[in-house]
Image: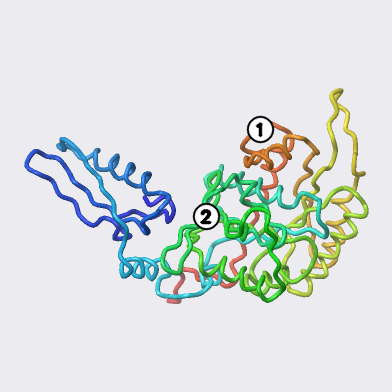
């Protein structure tokens, strides 16, 4: 399996030749996408291991070389299936798209996004994350990703961290450099992150939106109209009142709000008591207000306690659901992930294998 594309090398025409000499030694030549392919050693090793399982061989030797421009173009067309468009908007797409939003910054929205994605991937689901917070990107660091996307023709292969495919503008700009873009350019970046990236067949795509209800949130509603919104807030009254504005955005863009996550809901002290550092009740208040905006109940899917382990995991590039799975915040975040995964999926717009007799 190609580790980036997640399809067999034979299906991708990446096995150029296989020869077996008179002594029973196999010589396999593999094609990699580019000369500097970061997965080259891994592909060679996996191909050698696979070939070595064939009975009767005395030895296996694997070599690789870069594809020609024509071969890369053919691969790109095969991956695009001949169409240059947003794959998530194709009829019959089963990818669940969740836009994680907040009314204001500082509520831990990005941390919640990273942990939900890692928790879903740990359960065996195919998960991708788009870092839609162009000015305040943080996903590469939270997943410990330092590699840049591999470019195959005009298609990008997203790097992976903790089983999650991630795309972020932070992978393309030098460290410490600000992204000084306005609305139209940010809109184009979101379009490219969907249409010009090979995501494969994802079960879930999470988008980490910038705080507030500005240009990017509106662009996501236009580019991915089937995206559902998950709202992150803290128990603090002022944070909750700001988060309630997301309801007006959801109503204006005709997007559904699937739930609320109350982050930093309390600090557990050594004696077992809970200190409500940011107050209480914010999650329930936001959920009730959003329910009025969208016309149906909006649940509080989880209350994530305040814990230094969450911050430490984000700083180290290892989400707390991976670094400390038995901790209280990890358990709460996995509960939110499970609630999202088990939410019934609507059939609107889906092609069903039915015929009229």
Quarter-of-image position of residue 75: bottom left
Query: Which residue: 53% across, 46% down?
Result: 163
- Left or right placement of residue 123 versus residue 282 in this view: left
Quadrant where the C terminus sits is: bottom left
Q: Are marks 1 and 2 in contact (CB under 8 Å)?
A: no
Q: Residues within 10 Å of mark 2 (few under 14, many from 20)?
A: some
Query: Which residue: 29% across, 39% down?
Result: 49
Label disc, if present, on residue 148 of the rendered structure: 2
Q: Position of residue 352 (x, y in %)?
A: 49, 69
Q: Residues within 10 Å of mark 1 (few under 14, many from 20)?
A: some
Q: CA distance from mark 1 to mark 2?
A: 27 Å
Q: Position of residue 182 (x, y in %)?
A: 72, 73
In this figure, which residue is indicated by the disc labeled 1? Answer: 324
User: Of residues 352 and 301, which is closer to you in this image?
Assistant: 301
Query: Which residue: 77% across, 57% down?
Result: 231
Q: In this picture, is 54 found above or below 28? A: above
Q: In this picture, is 285 found above or below 54? A: below
- Check the image and tell me how it is coloured: rainbow
Q: Position of residue 351 (x, y in %)?
A: 50, 71
Judge whether residue 153 can be spotted in this image. Answer: yes
């Amino acid at each position: 399996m190609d580790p980036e594309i997640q399809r067999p090398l034979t299906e991708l025409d990446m096995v150029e030749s296989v020869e077996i000499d008179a002594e029973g030694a196999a010589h396999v030549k593999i094609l990699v996408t580019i000369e500097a392919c970061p997965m080259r050693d891994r592909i060679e090793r996996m191909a050698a291991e696979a070939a070595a399982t064939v009975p009767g061989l005395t030895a296996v030797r694997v070599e690789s070389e870069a594809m020609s421009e024509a071969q890369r173009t053919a691969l790109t067309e095969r991956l695009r299936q001949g169409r240059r468009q947003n794959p998530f908007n194709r009829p019959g797409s089963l990818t669940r798209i969740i836009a994680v939003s907040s009314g204001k910054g500082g509520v831990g929205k990005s941390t919640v996004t990273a942990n939900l994605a890692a928790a879903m991937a740990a359960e065996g689901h195919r998960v991708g994350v788009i870092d839609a917070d162009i000015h305040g990107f943080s996903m590469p660091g939270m997943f410990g990703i330092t590699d840049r996307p591999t470019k195959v023709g005009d298609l990008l292969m997203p790097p992976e961290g903790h089983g999650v495919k991630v795309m972020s503008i932070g992978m393309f700009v030098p460290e410490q450099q600000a992204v000084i873009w306005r609305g139209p350019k940010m809109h184009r970046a979101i379009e490219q992150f969907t249409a010009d990236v090979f995501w494969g067949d994802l079960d879930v795509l999470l988008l980490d939106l910038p705080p507030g209800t500005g240009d990017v949130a509106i662009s996501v509603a236009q580019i991915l109209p089937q995206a559902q919104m998950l709202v992150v807030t803290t128990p603090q009254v002022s944070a909750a009142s700001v988060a309630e504005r997301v309801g007006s955005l959801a109503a204006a863009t005709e997007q559904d709000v699937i739930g609320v996550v109350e982050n930093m809901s309390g600090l557990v002290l050594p004696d077992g008591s809970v200190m409500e550092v940011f107050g209480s009740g914010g999650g329930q208040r936001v959920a009730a207000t959003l329910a009025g905006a969208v016309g149906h109940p909006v649940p509080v899917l989880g209350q994530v306690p305040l814990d230094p382990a969450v911050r430490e995991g984000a700083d180290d590039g290892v989400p707390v659901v991976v670094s400390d799975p038995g901790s209280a915040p990890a358990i709460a975040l996995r509960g939110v992930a499970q609630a999202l995964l088990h939410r019934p999926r609507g059939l609107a717009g889906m092609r069903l294998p039915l015929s009229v007799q």
